[in-house]
Amino acid sequence: MTERSLLLLRHAKSSWDDPSLDDFDRPLAKRGREAAPRIGKEMARRGWLPDLALVSPAARTRQTFGMVAAELPVAPAAAFDRSIYEAPAGRILAAIRAVGDEVRTLLVVGHNPGLEDLASDLASSRSDSQALALMSKKFPTGAITLLTFDGSWRDLGSGTARLDAFVTPRDLGRVTGF
């Protein structure tokens, strides 16, 4: 069996400065623009290097992905998938299950509550208890989870993955070097 890694990244903090903008078009706030590169650097430091990214096409998710990808040694190919915009967990899971098995590490950049619900549903009893406890308290903007499992993407389901890590921008502080 092949071990696969699933990274679920909630978009960084978005701006509400322009009330005339549609939700889909809201950009990142200053805090989000600061946090996204830090998450990318942390992903690179930990060796979390996706082969493919499924990205909601909303402005804030596209910007988050771009800033994260810029910090990785090799930017993954991106598929901008309208079906995961503001999607419930089941719709995000359907998009993940459609990914080809040539992808070993997948990054999904999306929105809450769908991402948080999906991570909670996928996490098995073999999950890291500290990561699970932190995630269950709050899944803030810019937070990322690492889930691992054996098998095919199409077989991913409730309780089939191990939650190995949960990282938030606050965990990384405001430093740019590690």
Image: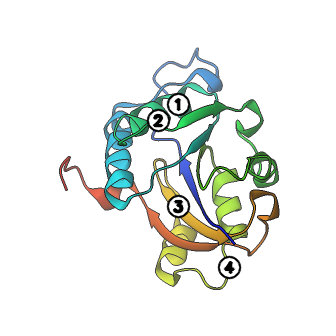
> Distance from label 2 to label 4 (Cα)?
28 Å
Q: Secondary structure at mark 2?
A: helix
Separation (CA) of disc 1 from disc 3 = 18 Å
- Residue 134 percent coordinates (x, y): 48, 72
Nearest to N terminus: mark 2 or mark 4: 2
Quadrant of image for the N terminus: bottom right
Q: Is residue 116 above or below residue 65?
A: below
Question: What numbered label is drawn on residue 64?
Answer: 2
Q: How many marks?
A: 4
- According to the picture, the residue beneath numbered tag 1 turns out to be 60
Residue appearing at x 61%, y 85% in the figure = 126
- Counting residues from the N terminus, which is met first, the one under dot 4 or under dot 1? 1
The residue drawn where x is 17% and y is 50% is 177
158 up-or-down from 63: above or below: below
Q: Which residue is mark 4?
A: 124
Residue type, numbered disc 3? Thr
Q: Amino acid at mark 4?
A: Ser
Nearer to the camera, 34 or 8: 8
- Residue under pointer 3: 145
Residue type, label 1: Arg
Position of 141 relative to 171 (above/below): above
Residue 17 found in image quarter: top left
